[in-house]
Image (tube, helix red, strand yellow):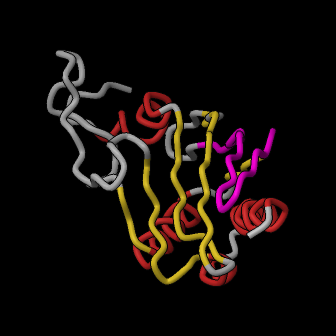
Amino acid sequence: MQDDATTRLAEGFITAWNTRDLAAFGRLFHPEFKWHIAVTDHDDPVMRPLQSKLLEGKNLSWPKSIFDKAATLAIFQGIFDRTSQFSIAPKSFTAQDDRVVVELVGDAINEQNGRRYNNLYCYVFQMKDGQIVLFREYQDTLLLFDVWSADRLPEARP
């Protein structure tokens, strides 16, 4: 696969996200697709407990770190249902062989608490048979926790 084809698939992902087009994701994702939220080693879906006294017993909002195609589409639908606006804007693309790395900025508002979610991302896409087979997502997980999860903790205060 040529570098420009991998970049086009990554651009297709960004367009599908920004237009909330789940059918496009269905076409972009390979049947063997995996979404890896990069908080664990490659191919390790088990979330590790947080170690600090401040965050002991708490964790991020997902139960594991690797999801298949069907689970990813369901999670994306849930995100779209909870946010009226959540966009991603690419800043750079680097493609080599069957992979492309994209630096992005995400922008959303948590409508329940009014917090702005302006996260920096690094997405690694791997292609197979003209589709995305791996989406590995690196992000600021503390910001994610602060904007989307912290208020759901029993001891959280307004």
Magenta segment: 91-109
Q: Is residue 133 left or right of residue 58?
A: right
Picture layout, residue 127 above or below residue 44: below
Q: Is residue 58 left or right of residue 122?
A: left
- Residue 47 location (% of width, % of height): 24, 45
Magenta segment main secondary structure: strand
Of 50 and 143, nearer the camera is 50
Give the residue drawn at x 53%, y 37%: 139
Give the residue drawn at x 16%, y 25%: 56
Q: Is residue 108 left or right of residue 144?
A: right
| Quadrant of the snapshot with the N terminus | bottom right
- Residue 155 location (% of width, % of height): 21, 28
Picture layout, residue 19 above or below residue 43: below
Of 132 and 79, nearer the camera is 132
| Quadrant of the snapshot with the C terminus | top left
Can residue 19 be seen here? The reply is no
Give the residue drawn at x 21%, y 17%: 52
Of 95 and 152, nearer the camera is 95
Q: Residue lying furthest right in this view? A: 4
Picture layout, residue 108 above or below residue 84: above
Q: Quadrant of residue 68?
A: bottom left
Q: Is residue 139 magenta?
A: no
- Residue 134 location (% of width, % of height): 52, 63
Q: Is residue 60 left or right of residue 125?
A: left
Count the marks: how many? Answer: 0
Q: Is residue 97 magenta?
A: yes
Can residue 106 be seen here? The reply is yes
- Residue 41 location (% of width, % of height): 33, 43
Give the residue drawn at x 69%, y 75%: 21
